[in-house]
Amino acid sequence: MKQNLEILAQIVVPEKFVILEREEYENLKEFESVGRWWTLEDVLKHISMSRKWLADNILNNPKFKTELDVNSGGFVKYPIAQGGKYLFLRSRTMQWLEENFSEIMKEIA
């Protein structure tokens, strides 16, 4: 025969921690990335790939470039001249990489 016991306990949360509802936590994480820009180095850290790999397989790949380029309504600012800087809208970059992972990997297989 099963028995159920009810136990009351007090849990002390240290001051450096905050308890949040999951939905509020997810909203805060999303808010943190909205409107934030990444450099090329930031993207490379995020995907753990080389600059050459990113350039060859995504940034300069005709299949993706039009979709990514800000001049076509995308979220990547390509450098104007050699040695110039890329800029990426962080939230859209992360979303695009997630949504297109299998397509990217098919391209390099």
Image: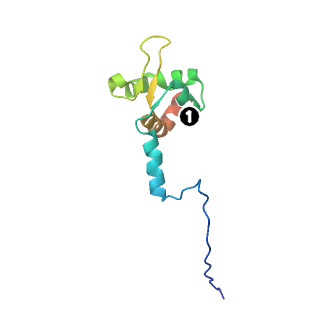
Task: Residue 74: name its quadrant.
Answer: top left
Residue 95 at x, y percent in the picture: 45, 39
- The quadrant the C terminus occupies is top right
Q: Residues within 10 Å of mark 1 (few under 14, many from 20)?
A: few
Residue 28 at x, y percent in the picture: 45, 48
**For residue 6, above or below residue 31:** below
Residue at the location (50% across, 58% down)? Answer: 20
Residue at label 1?
46
Residue at the location (45% across, 56% down)? Answer: 23
Task: Residue 68: name its quadrant.
Answer: top left
Give the camera-side residue of 60 and 93: 93
Left or right of 101: which side holds 69? Answer: left
Give the camera-side residue of 76 and 16: 16
Residue 18 at x, y percent in the picture: 54, 56
Residue at the location (36% across, 25% down)? Answer: 70
Tell which residue pokes out farthest to the right in this image. 1
| Residue type at numbered disc 1 | His
Q: Secondary structure at mark 1?
A: helix
